[in-house]
Amino acid sequence: MTMQRPVVSKAEMLIRKPVKEVFAAFVDPAITTKFWFTKSSGKLEPGKDIRWDWEMYGAFAEVSVKAIEKDRRILIEWPTSVEWLFTPKSDDSTFVSVTNKGFTGNDDEVVSQAIDSMGGLSLLLAGCKAFLEYGIMLNLVADHNPDAHKSRRS
């Protein structure tokens, strides 16, 4: 069997904070490091290449920022395409939708990548929600696979 349409991964979440705050949480690494990666080479800006590190795993990603529409949209490549859309629901709540597409490989590999992506994006949005709404750092990314931490592999 061959896929009839491209596989897309999507995660969505309502975050009870104004769109300006939610958008900033994904653009400004001083905030993003509280719920996703541990280190970044800079803020997301159009045309900029950024490095994100997950130091506990000894992993990093090179991110190419393709588009930024303030308080509305972020589009990156890393190497697949990831797009965040920010929709104000009221003055103090924002609906965030994250879509990842461009998976490659055979059908089984594409499906596996999409499932992994959806799980990761869901953790990302849940961590952001907890941090922005309640000031709680849930450590979801670090606790997702503690046996893979660098200090445990030595």
Image: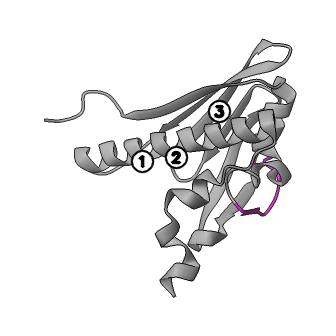
Report if residue 108 lies within the magenta region. no
Residue 5, image x, y percentages:
31, 28
Instruction: Please name the amino acid that badge 3 sits on.
Output: Trp
**Front in this rendered view, residue 4 or 112:** 112
Q: Position of 142 compared to 18: left or right?
A: left
Magenta region: 38-47
Q: Residue at x 38, y 42 (%)?
A: 115
Colour approach in the figure: one colour
Q: How packed is label 3: few (under 14 Cα within 10 Å), some, or many (20 or more)?
A: many
On the rendered image, what quadrant is the N terminus found in? Answer: top left
Classify mark 1: residues with Cα within 10 Å, few (<14), some (14-19) or many (20+): few
Q: Which mark is residue 120?
A: 2
Give the residue drawn at x 57%, y 70%.
57
Mark 2 touches mark 1? (CB < 8 Å): yes
- Is 83 placed left or right of 69 in the picture? left
Residue corresponding to mark 1: 116
Q: Main secondary structure of the magenta part?
A: loop
Percent x, y of residue 7: 36, 34
Task: Specify which label sits upstream in the sequence, 2 or 3.
Answer: 3
Give the quarter of the image for residue 38.
bottom right
Residue 128 coordinates in the image, percent (x, y): 70, 40
Question: Which of the two marks, 1 or 3, is nearer to us in this view?
Answer: 1
Cα separation, mark 1 vs mark 3, equals 17 Å
Is 142 located above or below residue 97 in the figure? Answer: below
Asked whether disc 1 touches disc 3, contact meaning CB atoms under 8 Å apart, the reply is: no
SS state under label 2 = helix
Q: In the image, what residue occupies the spot 65% across and 33% down?
A: 84
